[in-house]
Amino acid sequence: MKLGALKNHFESELSDTYPKEEIQSFFTLLLDYFLNYSRIDSVTRASETIANDEVEKFNETIIRLQRHEPIQYIIGETEFFGFPFFVNEHTLVPRPETEELVLWVLSEMKGRESQRILDIGTGSGCIAVSIAKNEPQSEVMALDISAKALEVARKNAERNDVAVTYHLHDILSEPLTYGNFDIIVSNPPYVRELEKAQMNPNVLEYEPDAALFVPDGDPLVFYRAIARQAKDCLNLGGFLFFEINEYLGKEMSSLLSSLGYRDIVVQKDMFGKDRMIKCTHHGSTE
Ligand code: GLN
């Protein structure tokens, strides 16, 4: 099959499932992944014949995409904060909103001496690794409950040539024994079961439930556990940063203020939704 025909076939097979621009960006990613061809090659080499076994790889991928499998899992990697990250079914696909959280953390770190940072629920390691990349003087530690996610996170630190110390840790049942952090950051699970109805099949059917969902009756369970323990692990004047559920900004502010945190700021994401919060630890009592 010629490359031009393959492209048309790919587009028509997926046109019922995805918008045109998205299909084109899938094709560009797959061209690079399977054939090492650039986007321009799909135009300049349109009349080139593609071997059957290569065409077969595209056909298999079409089926996976029709079933809404995220393209990032199919090719096994994605980009976050301009850096390459391995991802698989044990980690979330990093979201652009989380890049904004990293940006916020980095803006707080700017101009300070080397700092100790803790990322709780690191998943693919995207937050920890991006911070370590941008602030090479900092000491970055990251925790996750999933050994399989930590395997991916370790590869991502290696791939991006940074040192991050990873530990297997269940924040809901194990006390935090690490300390003296200047910043603790977390993007814990925060989607309520009741929000499932608004979610897409690529998320619901493929991404790890444990990284996403919290009970309707206690959606802040991770934040409470982290914020309580963080007071013993943060230096005075240290910061706590969270990515949050867009509907729970007020509840988050109350929680943090009831625990004695100060300078609480909620920030919106690029979509205008309450998406992150930061506060400081001044050592006050509850
Ligand atoms: N923002 C993610 C989503 O909407 C959820 C991330 C999380 O639960 N921490 O799928």
Image (cartoon, rainbow, N blue to C red):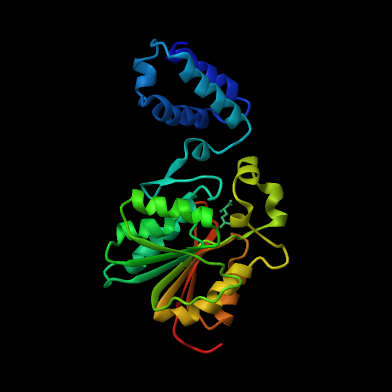
Q: Residue furthest bottom?
A: 285
- Looking at the image, which residue is at 44% across and 77% down? 280
Quadrant location, the C terminus: bottom right
Residue at image position (43%, 31%) is 29
Residue 250 shows up from this direction: no
Taking 260 as reference, is 251 above or below it? above
What residue is rendered at 68% in x and 48% in y? 198
Asked whether, in this view, residue 111 is left or right of residue 224, the answer is: left
Rendering quarter of residue 44: top left
38 or 164, which lies in front?
Answer: 164
Q: Nearer the viewer, residue 76 or 240?
A: 76
Indicate the quadrant where residue 215 lies.
bottom right
Query: Where is residue 212 drawn, in percent x and y?
Result: 61, 55
Quick one: 118 or 90, which is closer to the camera? Answer: 90
Residue 65 at x, y percent in the picture: 58, 31
Determine if residue 95 is in view.
yes
Q: How many marks?
A: 0
Where's residue 204, x and y in %? 65, 46
Please say if 102 is above or below 67.
Answer: below
Give residue 232's position: percent from left, percent from top.
48, 82
Q: Is residue 50 above or below residue 105?
A: above
Identified at 39% across, 20% down, the residue is 42
Q: Is residue 82 left or right of residue 90?
A: left
Q: Horizontally, is 89 left or right of 82 in the view?
A: right
Q: Quadrant of ligand 1?
A: bottom right
